[in-house]
Image: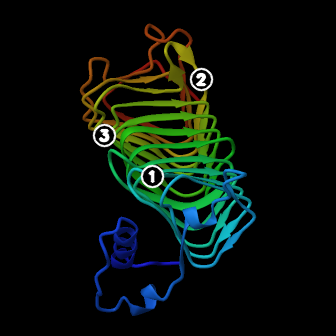
Amino acid sequence: MQWGVRAISAAVLGILGVGTLAVPGATAAAEQPTTLCTDLWNQREGIVANVEVVGDLIVDGSCYMLRSSVTGDVVVPDGLGVVLSEVVVDGDVRVSGRAALELSIVGGAVELDGAGTASLRVEGGTVRDVGGLAREVTFAWGARLTGTYDVTASEMHRLQGSTFVGPVTARGGRLLTHGSTFADVTAVGSRDAIVCRTTVTGDLTVTALADYARIGLEGRERCGVTIGGSLVLRDNPHSVDLGEVAIARDLVCVRNSGPRVVSGTPAFTEGSRVTVGRVTYGDCWYEWVWI
């Protein structure tokens, strides 16, 4: 369910005691029921459990919700946090603070709005789209993203043991993938990028690194990466080291200038094995094994 930005701001201001302002065109949004999490809080159990929230849920304090549903949006202001465990949200989850989704389903988008404050943890369950500005994002324990991931993180993208059906664009921060399956992955401006025990059915692109990248390699230990499309390494001023990487299509290396440029040499990685299905372009230093 879409809820206008002005209406969200008005609701949050109301929580903070600042008051709300009438805005043109907001009448329909204002009619949407809203519920404060503290109004549902079970003091004895210390949770909100087995409830249906009709309309939007506003997090206004400690909020742990279990086996419940929200027909509208969930709004998490800066400085506050929510845990949704086995919860179905029909609308969006809008996060300026902290949100943990455990075995939950989000029918709308997860919108992150806080480069230094917003954090998201998804363990199991399914979400559609994730986007915006965050401090860190974690996917783990078989989580599934069915739409797009486009997040700028100040600290970390930790994408482990999960499935990403749509394209993933990880901007800034550190990128760490282990045991996940992706469609397409693009890392832009990562402080460093570690891609390990990962399958990418489409293309993997790494560009504008702010520190090194290691693909199919963690430390000096190999960890297999399979790429169904091409591996594209472009405009990286830091080294890209390759361990065990199977590339079905092309390896493309353009304008990379780190100390080792793009290296897959056994001199650096004992037993390094990079297989390329079609052709290699550009500034790669390699001893590849061709398919």
Which secondary structure, mark 3? loop
Give the residue type at disc 2.
Cys
For image coordinates 63% across by 65% down, the residue present is: 40
> At x 52% / y 22%, what residue is drawn?
217
Q: Mark 3 — residue? A: 189
Going by the image, does 85 lie left or right of 243? right
| Front: mark 2 or 3 | 3
Q: Could you tell me if residue 126 is visible in this image?
A: yes
Q: Image quarter for residue 289? A: top right
Q: Looking at the rendering, which quadrant does residue 78 occupy?
A: bottom left
Name the disc covering residue 223, or none.
2
Expressed as whole percent of the image width and height from the top left, the position of residue 249 reads 52, 43
Number of the front mark, 1 or 3: 1
User: Which residue in the protein does label 1 denote?
Assistant: 80
* N-terminal-most mark, 2 or 1: 1
Q: Could you tell me the amino acid type at mark 1? A: Leu
Left or right, 93 with reference to 87: left
Q: Secondary structure at mark 1?
A: loop
Which residue corresponds to the image point at 45% horizontal and 37% vertical from the top-left?
Answer: 279
Which amino acid, mark 3? Gly
